[in-house]
Image (cartoon, coloured by chain):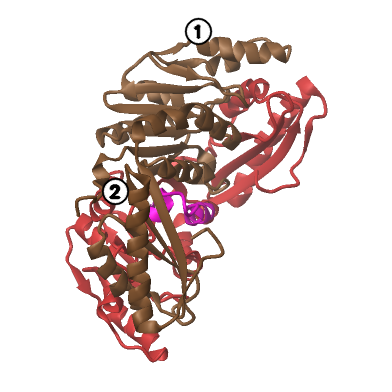
Chain colours: A red, B brown
Amino acid sequence: MEEAIKLDTRLNCELISIGNELLIGKVVNTNASWLADKLTKLGVAVKRITVIGDDLDEISSCIREALSRKPSLIIMTGGLGPTYDDKTLEGLAIALGLKLTVHPEALEMVKRKYETMGESLTDARIKMAKMPEGAIPLHNPLGTAPAAKISCESTIIYALPGVPREMEAIFNEAISKEISLYSGFKIAEHSFRIVGVMESALAPIISKVKEQYPEVYVKSHPKGTEEKPIIHVYLNAFHRDGNIAKRIVLEAAEKLISLIEDSYGKVVYPLENSNA
Amino acid sequence: MEEAIKLDTRLNCELISIGNELLIGKVVNTNASWLADKLTKLGVAVKRITVIGDDLDEISSCIREALSRKPSLIIMTGGLGPTYDDKTLEGLAIALGLKLTVHPEALEMVKRKYETMGESLTDARIKMAKMPEGAIPLHNPLGTAPAAKISCESTIIYALPGVPREMEAIFNEAISKEISLYSGFKIAEHSFRIVGVMESALAPIISKVKEQYPEVYVKSHPKGTEEKPIIHVYLNAFHRDGNIAKRIVLEAAEKLISLIEDSYGKVVYPLENSNA
């Protein structure tokens, strides 16, 4: 198919989530799913999400491992605050073999923030302005710790705060536009619900459609049981031309629906709940 | 401190979550946080959570990377179903250099399940009984796909379904007991809330307590803003003797509270919301 999407030509990204609270199950990693959703909609392929603790060795080796896979982007969240266990930028400096220094512009951001509160700089506050040499600080509109951006060979690395509203604000304000400039891919999605067909009976039908539309991602989510099956089906496709993406994904969905209804009659319904 | 907990003597675990739906942000990885919480309470240290897509190369290389770090346990979730993109056990076989064969006992489990529904075996259903040679199938009380257990050198690997209620049932029935037999560590936890002290002002106080109690994990979660600060503080410690763990964590918490209140007066309150 001439219009087939070469997935390799999409920007790809790894997410690294830092924080012991994620590893002890106190916090659900909604930052990663929020970013994954945003990035997917921007046409970026998220290839891996890694969660590690507040540990310098873990952080630096995890970054090195990610860099060795040469993703277009690495987005890190967590570990930018003032406390002893906020070690992201120190770990980043180690991974990149760079010095960690107080960035004058970042220090200015932190200082200004505390001045408006009638507070002065302390070691813990200056710590938030320490970045690997060459990093660019990004203004944090809702918090104190600046985010950071730095390149390593062909990979752009962003380090964002772990507090969700701060992370989201910085992504929306500064990063989303940058990525969409480079990405160029549009996503098209389609979802529906199948009632009364077992996932194991659906499997060969989905495989047939996948053979015909290899560039379309098809995922079945069993929501009932094999005995009382309700299956949510989600399809997506990416293309530089959003209309072509839409057409391909709709064609694949219609093919899938007609094959299912040929065997089982009227079993396909719209999905009320969008969380397919 | 003679009672100091050598964290290295605790069992450690890596979680591998498999599924494109996690990488496109359609599904939040609650399986990982559920398992992390359970494992932590069993005294196990979760060191890393990796999320990868339904891709054979990704799955097998991710398992090999995890094995190279020699964790006591690897728990995988997702990718055991009947559809084309369920590739966990094939990826596991490749990673371990083992043949993927139909396991007679697993096949019996699958067959029995479908017989009670008046259904016969198909390729898609037999697929769920294919496991790496030497794997032990684990009964899935709420679903069709058996889970699998296999050892590789000093690491025990469990592959569980991705459907949360099936994953949880198998963990609770079969795995939790096994782990608690080997673990031997007890966790003690303590949480409280600090109102009106900025996280950046708290940072040096927490550092002081950490120096005195290096074996206690202390995490501050900013819930307000730096201007109107509310901070949830969480402490934990592990010990073979649960009472010692409790004593250590309470001592550290009391030290922390008294240092904060020496500087700021009455600012520490109980945590109504347990999600510290």
State the image coordinates of residue A226 (x, y, percent, origin top left). Answer: 68, 24
Q: Nearer the viewer, mark 2 or mark 1?
A: 1
* Position of the C terminus of chain A by quadrant: top right
Q: Which residue is label 1 attached to?
A: B104
* B66 in the magenta segment: no
Q: Quadrant of residue B254?
A: bottom left
For the residue pair B137 and A233, the one nearer the viewer reads as: B137
Q: Residue at x 68, y 40 (%)?
A: A250
Amino acid type shown at disc 1: Pro
Q: Check residue A62 in the rendering and tell me which mark sits there, or answer none.
A: 2
Q: Helix, strand, or loop for circle 2? A: helix
Q: Is residue A27 above or below residue B39?
A: below
Amino acid type shown at disc 2: Cys
Q: Check residue A9 in the rendering and tell me which mark sits there, or answer none.
A: none
Dot 1: chain letter: B
Residue range corresponding to the magenta coloring:
A12-37
Q: Residue furthest top?
A: B104
* Position of the N terminus of chain A by quadrant: top right
